[in-house]
Image (cartoon, grey):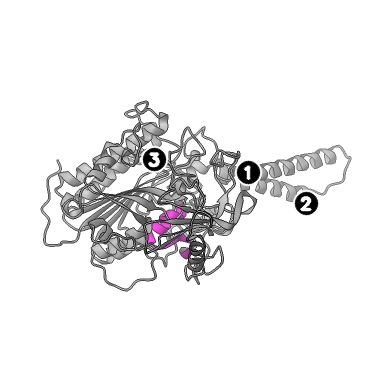
Amino acid sequence: RICPVKKGLDSRPNFVLIMVDDLGIGDVGCYGNHTIRTPNIDRLALEGVKLSQHIAAAPLCTPSRAAFLTGRYALRSGLASSGRVPVLLFLAGSGGLPPTETTFAKRLQKQGYTTGLVGKWHLGVNCVSRGDHCHHPNQHGFHYFYGLPFTLFNNCVPGQPVDVLADVEQVLRSLSQLLGLGLLTLVCLRALGLLSVSVGLLVALTCLTAGGVAVWYVPFRFLQTWNCIVMRNQEVVEQPLVMETLAERMLNEAQHFISRNAHQPFLLFFSLAHVHTPLFNSPAFAGKSRHGVYGDNVEEMDWIIGQVTETVDSLGLANNTMMYFTSDHGGHIEDPQRGGWNGIYKGGKAMGGWEGGIRVPGIFRWPGRLPAGRVVDQPTSLMDLYPTLRHLAQDTEADRPLDGHDLMPLLEGRSRRSEHQFMLHYCGSYLHAVRWQPPDCDSVFKVHYVTPVFSPAGTGGCSDQEFCSCYGDQVTSHDPPLVYDLLHDPTESRPLSPANERRFAEVLRRVDEAVAGPVTRGPRTQGPEHGVPNQMSWDHILWKPWLQPCCGTFPFCGCQDNSRPPG
């Protein structure tokens, strides 16, 4: 039985940060959805502050989460890709959040907070050897970790379509088949006496063929084992993961973390696996929504959030706990059966400039401190959590340059204006758009330098290739750029021109000046900060067997989680 807790003299608040995966802003009731039931999220908004222009720093998981945790654009930490792979694809790659980076968990840990992460990480594990855990959550300020060091992929469920470099796998498979066919041909010709082939050559070709088969078969055919695992701190406790019980276990872990740390300041980052594909099929929610399996998942996610809220409230922690709810980026619109809805906003996941890929829910609840039912219609960012938490934790130590701002003046109503005059919108390492809110008016101008080429044309997405690309012949560069006023045209459907906007030339000039500033250090793209390796290069992304987390003796990895949360 959970009993209420009386707080001591420490006036610093607790933090419960809830991030869902791939949720569209239009999937939530308080953001305009009238057919999917989200009463618990709606309750947070009624009892707290809702942000209507809350912006992810990137339209995909890895870079968005890096920016959220560090308060800085992902390109500063080397996690903004300039190639075809925009997120980490293998758990046994060497890329990830650099050990030199600072997260809000590290800062709060130094201030005496007990910190925990339950759920998805997707920011790397090892650098040089299996077990160095250089990118692991424990090395980035989290005392406790339980969950997915990687993410959910279709490969986590047998029978689902492959979504990790499927074309590369096909090429490698075809090459190995050609090698095998060539070897078989040579053996037959030699056996028939039609061709003189040395045994040494046949042995070499056999080894080459076997190596070719291993290169594609081992990494790709066993992806469920390699990528889909559960860890408790640095121990692999389930490999491969069991989807049927994952949601229940993660909720249980989050509730236990709150209850066992109720007597001291704590930070919980609850990073849900919902509603990323493959979707859950929980019997209690299956077939209950009006929107198929995806709607069932959204409603289950809302129920989980209600359970966490009830835990906070039943322990008597509500008045001293800031709760926060968001999504890492917009919904995936290319798959209408399994993807989210981004409301009135154009575009979706993987689109760096259009609002649908980056405008996300943002809700804060802190009874007694934040006014109930307040709506903030100002540009805010997921990167703002870092400086906000630092401020509330009374952390006054010097820090490196940040791209986020303390949200408390806006949340409490002490300020009417966001400190974000400019926001840069990257697709990988490519700058696609910039927004500017002039200090003398309420308009928010959006300047698009690059937009994705939709395929099929006119569909509003890139279903021909699953995701829109960030560069090359799959994008359109605009000169002059496209300009919209989001205040009057949030759907980005009526571009401005000198004929209908008197400030048109000023908007372009001011935004170009911001682009040439210290953040971008280049005309339209940039690499990581000086001394920070590019974590998204092929040598960091590809599977390395010596880095593979494993329960058991590699490569015979396998175990089932029968453990329980710490008491």
Instruction: Name which quarter of the figure residue 175 lies in.
Output: top right
Q: Secondary structure at mark 3?
A: helix
Q: Position of residue 236 (x, y in %)?
A: 39, 48
Q: Name the side, left or right, on which 471 lies relative to 300.
A: right
Q: Amino acid at mark 2?
A: Gly
- Which residue does the numbered mark 2 point to in the structure image? 200
**Quarter of the image where one finds residue 141:** bottom left
Q: Earlier in the sequence, mark 2 or mark 3?
A: 3
Whether 504 is drawn above or below 217: the answer is below
In this picture, residue 112 sits left or right of residue 171: left
Name the residue that disc number 1 marks.
Answer: 167
Dot in front, 2 or 3: 3
Specify which label sits upstream in the sequence, 3 or 1.
Answer: 3
Question: Which residues make up the magenta segment?
Answer: 62-76
Mark 1 or 2, nearer chain start? 1
Q: Nearer the viewer, residue 275 or 48?
A: 48
- The dot on residue 26 is 3
Please state which of residues 156 and 468 is positioned toward the viewer in this rendering.
Answer: 468
* Real-space CA distance between mark 1 and mark 2, rounded to the nearest whole angstrom: 33 Å
Q: Residues within 10 Å of mark 1 (few under 14, many from 20)?
A: few
Q: Quadrant of the N terminus?
A: top left
Locate residue 478 relative to residue 76 in the image: left or right. Answer: right
Q: Nearer the viewer, mark 1 or mark 2?
A: 1
Residue at (37% x, 51% y) in the render = 53
Label 2: which secondary element: helix
